[in-house]
Image (tube, grey):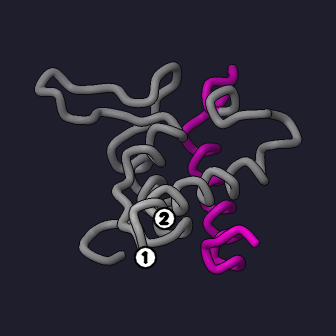
Amino acid sequence: MKNNKAQNATEVLIAARWMLKNIGWCQGQYERYNYDNTSKAFCALGSIRAVETSPEYDVESIYAPKSYAIYFLLSIISNNYNNIQSWNDSSGQTKNNIIKVFTKAIKLSKAANGKVK
């Protein structure tokens, strides 16, 4: 990370996984808040949305790391789900399973140097 901002999909996934583990996980909405308006929990996609990114070359590339992170997550869950929200919100889903899938996505992203070819 540079200036505490993710530079690629791997860093986005690592930061999002950290938020899910250490801040909290939820279903049914992108983010839940405490009474003082601080984040209490994130869904899988909400955690990715919350990660700050920094463009490598230009303003348009600021979205690429998050898009690639979503691609790597979907590549793992797409056999059973067609989007991250339905996977996150499915009956019986657990925080531990979400974190395990993020870990797998991190491995895929690392193998691809954080970019989709």
Residue 78 picture quarter: top right
Left or right: 3, with 80 as reference point: left
Left or right: 26, with 41 as reference point: right
As drawn, the label of residue 61 is 2
Q: Residue at x 48, y 48 (%)?
A: 48
Nearer-the-camera pick, 14 or 59: 59
Where 97 sits versus 116, above or below? above
Q: Which residue is drawn at 78% across and 33% down?
A: 82
SS at circle 1:
loop
Residues at badges 2 and 1 in contact (C-beta under 8 Å)? yes
- State the image coordinates of residue 24 (x, y, percent, origin top left): 38, 39
As drawn, the label of residue 57 is 1
Amino acid type, callout 1: Tyr
- State the image coordinates of residue 12 (x, y, percent, origin top left): 47, 61
Where 39 sits versus 102, above or below? above
- State the image coordinates of residue 40 (x, y, percent, origin top left): 29, 33
Q: Distance between the residues labelled 2 and 1?
A: 7 Å
Residue 95 picture quarter: top right
- State the image coordinates of residue 110 (x, y, percent, origin top left): 63, 77
Amino acid type, callout 2: Ser
- Judge whether residue 18 is colored magenta: no
Q: Which residue is drawn at 85% across and 35% down?
A: 80
SS at circle 2:
helix
| Predominant SS of the magenta segment | helix
Where 87 sits versus 108, above or below? above
Q: Give the range drawn in magenta.
A: 88-117
Nearer-the-camera pick, 73 or 100: 73
- Judge whether residue 101 is colored magenta: yes
